[in-house]
Image (tube, coloured by chain):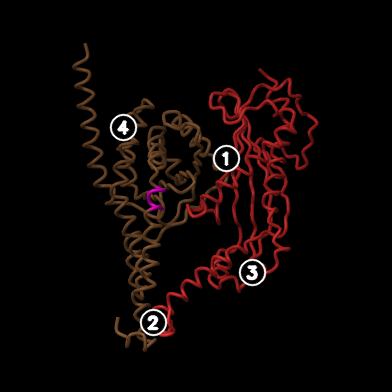
Chain colours: A red, B brown
Amino acid sequence: MSRGNLARPGIRKALFRLTAVLGAFALGCAYKPLTQTSGPVQSAASLDSAVVKSAGALPSSLTPAISLSLHARYLHFGKPMGPSMEKWWAKQQTKLRARVQDMQCQTPWLVSARWDDAEAIDRLVLETTFDTRGSKARYWITEFSKYLVPSSDEGVVSVRARVYRKGALVREYEAEGTYRTRRHLIFLFLPMMWHSTVPGKVAENTIQDALLAVEHDAQTLFSTP
Amino acid sequence: MPRRFFRHPKIFYSRIGASQAACLAAALLATGCSAALEEIHRHPQEARLEETLGRMKSVTSHPEKHYWARVVKPDKHTVGLGVQFQRHIYVSEPLAAQADDAMLAAILAHGLAHHRLHHMGQRSGILTFQKVAFKVGGTFVPGLGYGKYASEALSEVAMGSWQEPSADAKTVEYLSEMGLSGQAWLKALQYLKDQGYAEQVGRMTMRGEDFTGRIAKLQELLKIEAVGSNAEKGNAP
C-alpha cells in the first residue's frame, strides 16, 4: 500500500475502526472476578438451619435409584444472555457438569443416581442461575469508556435443588454464593489479579451447599416408600 | 463521495448524527421501547407454570430439554408472554393469576412452540449477518454502519410476520396432543388482545392490532382442522 493510499480518509477511517474493534475485543478479556463471599443455605420447606450438617445422611444402599439433572442459565442483570455468549455458556455448563459428577462420586447417597433419566419417578433437579447484580449505569459507563472508568458488580450463583418423588415435587432447597467482579483497563495488564477460577469455585461450593441441605433431609425424603 | 465531504468535519459529523438519530427513531417506531422483563423470585404461580410445562414437554420431540418458566413483574408495556434466549418463557404476574388452566397451557404451549421451532436462533442468525454486513459497509460508506439500528428492527418485524403463524399452528398441534382443544389458544389470543397484553419474542413486542391478523389466520386453520377431522370421522367404518 502506497503512502498516498494511506493518506486517503476512507482507508484511514477503515484502519481506525479495525483497531477500535480489535482493541474492544482485547479489553473485553479483562472481565475477571476478584473476591468471593458465600451465602447461607436456605430451604423452601422452612429448613432454617444456615449451617447444614450431614448427620442424617443416608447410606447408598438405602437410597432408591434417583435421576439427577443439572440445568444452568446465565443472566446479565436479570436478563438471559443472548446467543453471542452461547458457546461460552455451553462450555461453562460442561465444566459445571463435570464438577457435579466429581461431587457425586464423593456423596454416598448420590453414587447410584443416574444422569438425566427421563423415566425415573424420583428425581433431583439442580437449577443453577448465574447472574450479575449491581449498577447497570456504571457497568454501561465502563463499557462505553472502554474500561477507563472502573466499575464493580456482584456475581451471584444461586442453586435451586428440587426433589421429586413419584413425579411430584416434594421439597425445594436453595443455596446462594456471591463473588465480586471489578472491571478496569489496568486489570488487562495484571493477570495475577484475575483469579479466573473464582466463579467456578463459588458455583461448586454453592452446589455442594445445596446437596448437603438435601442430604440433611434425605432420611425423610427417600426412606419412606 | 466528494472529497469536500471529508474536508469539513462539521458537515460529516452532523450528517452522521442525523442518520444515526433517524435510524434509532425508525428502530423505536418499529419495535417500540423494548421492555426488560423482571423475574419474581419464587412466585406462588411458578409451581403451576412448572407443572403445566412438565405435562406439555412430554408431547414435544425432545422431552428432556429444560425450560425456564418464570413469572415476571407487570411492566408499563404489560408484556403478557415473553420468549427469551436460553429457553426462557415468561408469563406476566396478572396474566398468570387470571388465566385458567386451559389458557395457561395454551400460553405456555405457544412459548414452547417458539423455542422448538428455533425462532430465537433464526432471529439472531439473520441479525448477526446484517450486523456484520452493515459493519463492513460502514467502513466504506460513512454512516452506513448506523443502518443496522433500523434494519434490525425492520427485520424483526418481517421475521415476526412469518414466525408467529407457524408458532400458532405448532401451539394448536401441542394442545391437541395434550388432549386440549386448539380453541384454547384462540381464546387466549383474543384475551391478550382484549386485555391489552403484549407478546414479546426476543426484542420484538406485538400487541393490539398485531393480534388481529393472527386471530383470523388461526380461525381459518381451526376451521380446516375441524373439517378434516369431521371428514375422517365420516370415512371411518
* Amino acid type, callout 1: His
Which marked residue is nearer to the observer: mark 2 or mark 4? Answer: 2
Label whose residue precedes the other's in the sequence (1 or 3): 1
The residue lying at 33 percent from left, 62 percent from top is B151
Q: Which residue is mark 2?
A: B13
Q: CA distance from mark 1 to mark 4?
A: 31 Å
Asked where in the image residue B222 lies, by quadrant, the reply is top left
Residue A50: give x, y in percent of width and height.
75, 43
- The chain to which mark 4 is attached is B
Distance from disc 2 to disc 4, alpha carbons, whole Å, reads: 55 Å
Q: Nearer the viewer, mark 4 or mark 3?
A: 3
Which residues fall within the magenta stretch? B120-125
Label 4: which secondary element: loop
Which residue matches tag 3? A184
Secondary structure category for the residue under label 3 = loop
Q: Chain of mark 1?
A: A
Residues marked 3 and 2 touching at CB (< 8 Å): no
Magenta residue check for A170: no
Q: Quadrant of residue A173?
A: top right
Query: Which residue is under mark 1?
Result: A71
Q: Chain of mark 3?
A: A
Q: Please tell me whether the stretch drawn in magenta is mainly helix, strand or loop.
A: helix
- Residue under pointer 4: B182
Calculate the distance from the C-alpha at mark 3 to the C-alpha at mark 2. 30 Å
Left or right of B202? Residue B4 is left
Amino acid at the residue labelled 3: His
Check chain identity for marks 1 and 4: say if they share one.
no
Q: Is disc 1 surrounded by few (<14), some (14 to 19) or many (20+) residues within 10 Å? A: some
What residue appears at the point 42 percent right and 33 percent down from the top-left corner? B101
